[in-house]
Amino acid sequence: MRAVIEARDLSRWYGNVLGISEVTLEIQPGITALLGPNGAGKSTFMKIITGQLKPNIGEAMIYGERVWNNRRIFRQLGFCPEADAFYEELTGFEFLTGLLSLYGFRQSECRERAEHVLKVVELYDVRHRQVRSYSRGMRQRIKVAQAIAHDPEILILDEPLSGLDPLSKRRVIKLIKEFKAHGKTIVVSSHVLPEVEAMTSEIVLIHQGKILARGDIYFIRELIDTHPHMIRIKSPAFRELARILAPEDYILNISFNQEDQSVIFETHHRDRFFNRLNDLVLESDLKVDEITSPDDNLQAIFDYLVGK
Amino acid sequence: MATIREKGYHHWEGQLLEKGRAFWPITRTGIKLAFQRKYFKFIFSGAFLPAVVYAAGIYISERLEDFKFMAQGAERTLQVDPGFFKSYLSLDFLFFMIILLMALGGAGLISDDFRHKAVQLYFARPITKLDYILGKAGVVVFFVGMLTLIPGLILLIIKLLFSGSFKFFLQYPWLIVSIIFYSILLMVFFTSFVLLLSSLSKNRRYVGVVIFALYILSDIAQGIIYVIFRSPYSALFSIKSNLKQVAAGFFMDKLPYAYPWYLSLIVLLVFCFLSYVVIKRKVRGVEVIR
Amino acid sequence: MKSEILRVFSFYFFLGKKSTRTKIFFVLSLVSVLLAVVIRVYRLAGHWTESGQVVFQNFLMVFFLQFLIIILALFYGTSTVAEELEGRTLPYLSSRPIARAAIITGKYLAYLSLTFMIMVSAVLASFLVLNLDQDFRLADLLTVIRYSLVLLLGLAAYLAFFTFLSTWLKKPILVGLAFGFGWESVIQYFPGTTQKFSVAHYLKSLLPQYTTSAGKLGFLFIRLEPSRPAIAVMTLLLIASVFLALASLIFSYKEYLFED
């Protein structure tokens, strides 16, 4: 199946500053998260695939067509930019209907769509207030609204949850997931890891303009061979546990935390470790209160990959 | 044994000293930012051209014998008297360059703060509204002063140096006071003019155009009113004419328009006062949206 | 393409009507009406004998021709791209299914309409104030229409030029000011064909008080060697078309980066 969004050897400079370098990516329908710190190149990539910027090298394509100056594609595209920018003198309703009219919808259809999407983002009651009087969260929601109002097939959302309270974040995440359920393609960027984890497991890690890793979060973790897995076990007999497992050849390192009575094992072979642990717990009287993997999350993966 | 310090946040154990010049960092930053604008330095340098020309004029007037072959009747045109200084300080070109510099470097003084909602950052610090306004005003005062007061005083010093005696100073002892006071008037007027317009918009581009537009419009208005009413009082509608009239008054020179010069001074001062009232009202830490 | 231009036109015309800037310029244009009122009162007091027609043609047109249309065109024309960059609203336009050339053309037409509306209401109001005491004549109405059309041509030409500057330069205001109030004023004092390198020359060629002896008011006007009216109209339309086309071309292919 042909990818919805394709990027081939995309590179972009701003003078001497590198934006992105040799980015090759194919994005299929579903939610793909671009994850990286500020200045990693996420916005640059999004600007290229939404036709705001031209790549210096390489090309970006949507549905097999080049993006730059190709207005046919934009009918299927909804873009929520990062900047807090509006036509401030318009009301929320006017802002949406005005931008919808640029798609060629009739006035009545613009009004209907605007009203519908205002209800979705819960700004219907304040639709006749000027955008300049909206709070930060309301402004962010109206920005998301203008991206989805025309029911696009592809949604590009640059930091869509920025400035939202926890409840609004949940609503927007739910909305994004609903879009996914309808078979749409969504590309979301963020530097907040829990937000990304809540939305999708399909991530693209970007740092200093390059793609560090791509795929399922757990799959990526498995790829990081240089860094052993960490498994933390909380037990009243944590030292005894350590004594029993220490001779195993797949245990690389053991550290203790006296305060919470836990021991952390580092190993390259998680499966063998857990098999042995299961046997131990069944065979002996060792009580285990808690088993966790401190590094089995995006933060840890990211830290490993950028070499912290 | 020495104490081992952790690498972490330490509370500052020094003393907070109160200094009386809260506006100075604002002025200093404003000047620095103005110089960072493209073409500003170029235009600012160009604005010193009249001063250079007038300095050369003083030199030539002292060495008239050597330059007699160049110009017949030069002793009349190159007479360095209070009118000479008045003509420099009320030169059309100088006013135009000041307006251009202000459109380029002064238009964003307050409007940029409104645009980027930075006024709150100022008033979250122990700065009063007066400090803020003085700080911004300081930028305009600096640039206008550099083009008026400093060259005016330097031209006077050059005259004294080249003439080799204090005769000129004794002949016109009030001249230095005129130079200082007229320069101060120019500084205060242009500061009020620029800050007023800057406080009325969030867009520095608009402010820049309006600075220019109002300056030119005032001349056009004078022209139209003069033709209708044939009255010298039409000059009261023009910024440039008012400044020239006051200059003639301060330097005890022939008045360009047939009415008392203090009327022009009153018009300018009233404008400055009203500008201050408006600026004070517009500069607020909180934006009220209705 | 036509429908895209129309969509952009509608959006920006609506936005422009609501903006504070338009209201301020409308008030500024009323300065002419204020002057007209002052002149009228002065005439009523018996101090002025020139007819309302003459006053309108020779005074107020100076205000409109040499100041207001330049300021309006400068403001709106240089804002065409600059306001989208400063406000960071360009992505809303460039991610819509509209040709980039249509964005520029639509905005240009919207701003031309707005500025013309501002201008023509001031022209009409000041003309009426000055000629209220006279019987209605068709010739007067034709005069107003003629002047309005000349001002429209001037607006179209200046606006197109400043729109072109806006698409090409990062800071179009300086060049715009230098052109509008520098070049346009100075070049008219030059004799011969040099005058033809200004928009003002062609506008004045279309107005009778500039092409015939103006009597005691002649000192107001600089030396003019007028072009033929047909040539003047064609040149102004050509200037507007060429610069608009250039602006559309540049905007279609140029990238615009926000100042970060």
Image: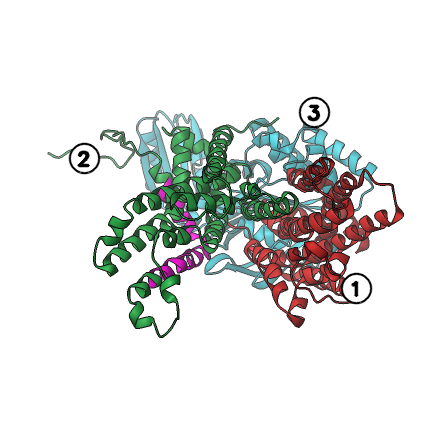
Chain colours: A cyan, B green, C red
Q: Residue A34: image x %, image y %? A: 55, 47
Q: Is residue A272 magenta?
A: no
Q: Which mark is residue C229?
A: 1
User: Where does the image place residue C49, in percent across and percent down from the top left?
Assistant: 74, 44
Crowd rating for badge 1 (residues with CA inside 10 Å; few <14, some 14–19, many 20+) = some
Which chain letter goes with mark 3?
Answer: A
Q: Nearer the viewer, mark 2 or mark 3?
A: 3
Disc 2 marks which residue? B4
Task: Judge whether residue A229 can be spotted in this image.
Answer: no
Residue at (35, 33) in percent of width and height:
A263
Disc 1: which chain?
C
Tag 2, which chain? B
Tags 1 and 3 on a common chain? no
Query: What amino acid is at disc 2?
Result: Ile
- Is C92 displayed left or right of B62 in the figure? right
Report whether B173 appears left or right of B205. Answer: left
Distance from the alpha carbon under mark 2 to that under mark 3: 60 Å
Q: Which residue has dot 3 on it?
A: A125
Q: Which SS class for mark 3? A: helix
Task: Please tell me whether mark 1 or mark 3 is closer to you in this view.
Answer: 1
Distance from Cα at disc 2 to Cα at disc 1: 90 Å
Range covered by the magenta-colored residues: B27-56
Q: Which amino acid does label 1 sit on?
A: Pro
Q: What is the quadrant of residue C182 in the picture?
A: bottom right
The reply to whether residue A305 is in sight is yes
Magenta segment's dominant SS is: helix
> Few, some or many C-alpha atoms within 10 Å of disc 3 (few <14, some 14-19, many ≥20)?
few
C-alpha distance separating marks 1 and 3: 57 Å
Numbered disc 1: secondary structure: helix
Q: In the drawing, what numbered circle is on residue C260?
A: none
Q: Return the residue nearer the eye: C12 or B241.
A: B241
Can you say whether A258 is above or below B143 in the image? above
